[in-house]
Every structure is written in C-alpha cells, then in structure tokens.
Amino acid sequence: MREEPAVVLVHGAFADSTAWNPVLAGLTRQDVDVIAVANPLRSLQGDAEYLRDVIEGIDRPVILVGHSYGGMVITEAATDLDAVRGLVYVAAFTPDQGESAFELAGKFAGSTLGSTPLAYPVGGNEVRIGPAKSHVQFAADPEFEDASRPGRTQRPVTEKALTDCLSTAKPAWRTQPTWQVFGDVDRNIPVELFRFQVRRSAPYGVYEVPGASHAVATSQPEAVTATILQAIAYATAY
C-alpha cells in the first residue's frame, strides 16, 4: 500500500472555500487529511502557481479536486508535479491546451450565465453574480437548505482568469487518473460539456447526479465525497 494522499479542494469562480464545507466535513469524518484552498481568482497562471506553492507546503502526495474554474487551475498546476496522484473534477472544466473557461462554457448550448445580471465591483476588471440571482443561477437544487448563501459569500473573479487559456501542452488529465462528478441541471456549465469532457478524458469514474445544480459540492456532498474517496482508494492501492 502507498502513502494515503492528502486532498486539496480548489473552488471556482463565484464561490469561496466555504462552498466545500459539507464535503470537507464528510472527508474529515473518514479521517482524510484535507484542506480547502482560497483560490485567488486573478489569473489562470497565477492561481496555478499559488496552488503549486500550497502543494509544496503539504510535503506529501495529494489528490487535487477542482470545482468549475477550479478545474482549469488544477489542470494547469498539476503538470509534471510528482506529488499529484489524481484529479477529481466537480462540475468543472477539464481543459485541453489553448482552451479557456469562457470558451468551454460556450461550446454547447444550455448555460444561462450569459443572461444573468453580473456585478462589476472593481472598475469592470472583475465580476460576480448578483446576489439576488445567485441561487437561481448557481444553486437551484431543491435540496439546498440555504440557496442564497453562495451569493453572499462568493469571491469576485477577474475576466482575465475566465479568458486565460491553458498553457501546458500536456494537460494533467492525460497522464493522471481522473474522476468526474457533475449535475444534470447545471445552469452555469452545460451538462453536454461535462459529457464531452468525459468522452475525451476517459476518467476512471463518472457520477452524473440527477437534479444537481452547479453547486453540487454543497447541495449533494455525499456524491462528491464518495467520488473523492474512490480517488483516494485508487491512489493508495496503486
């Protein structure tokens, strides 16, 4: 048996690290060493460099878990990084070289983010979903106990981060074992994009959660936690 990896949770745009709280609690109950990173949301390369610094400080193997734009960050950060033992994409972009979050989000019809009012809190350089609309756009699951909370805690994201393209010619999902979990009523990222990404990345496990929104890690944490535990088990055994 190999050393059990730590888990690093990376949130995406229009969210913050508290979005992982239900998953973090579930993993902690299983005695998993887990940390939820505060993703800067400034630029893809800068955010990835920050994540690599976090991983270096852990000083043990890791499973990287990315939500939404966080999938861009874990893909960029994990390239040629020996500590990474697997990648879990949670309603996340799984980009190839030259692709951006903005480009991927528009690859298939179905996202309503473009018609949702966005706020520009700092001179038009960064955006957030208007809090009054966040629960409809981001967290529309019937099971969500407090669907308005993500709108109140979200970190603004720069337009640069959303339009930056993956620079690496060898995306980590091509060489590392990966897992995918996502909802089928996601209003930020079309479910057809997730299915396309599954086809091209050939993940070790796929969980399409019926009725789950973009905030699947908060509204349906059991599915996300179970997927991460599968990744840990594989990384420990092989």
Image (cartoon, grey):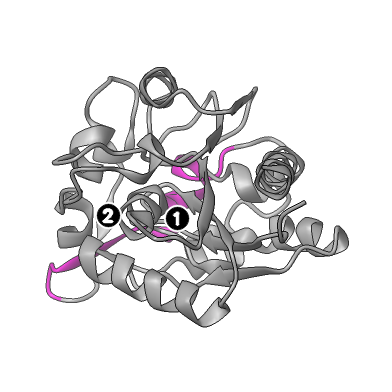
Q: Looking at the picture, which amino acid does disc 1 mark? A: Ala
User: SS at mark 1?
Assistant: helix
Q: Is residue 6 magenta?
A: no
In the figure, residue 224 lies in which quadrant? top right
**Along the line of sight, the residue nearer the viewer: 29 or 143:** 29
56 above or below 90?
A: below
Measuring 19% from the left and 76% from the top, which residue is drawn there?
A: 122
Horizontal and vertical percent position of residue 233: 74, 44
Left or right: 45, with 73 as reference point: left
Q: Are marks 2 and 1 in contact (CB under 8 Å)?
A: no
| Residue furthest bottom as drawn | 57
Label 1, on which residue?
132
Label 2, on which residue?
118
Q: Quadrant of the C terminus?
A: top right
| Residue furthest front as drawn | 1
Q: Which residues are magenta?
A: 123-140
Q: Is residue 139 magenta?
A: yes
Neighbour tally class for label 1: few under 14, some 14-19, many 20 plus, Cα within 10 Å: few
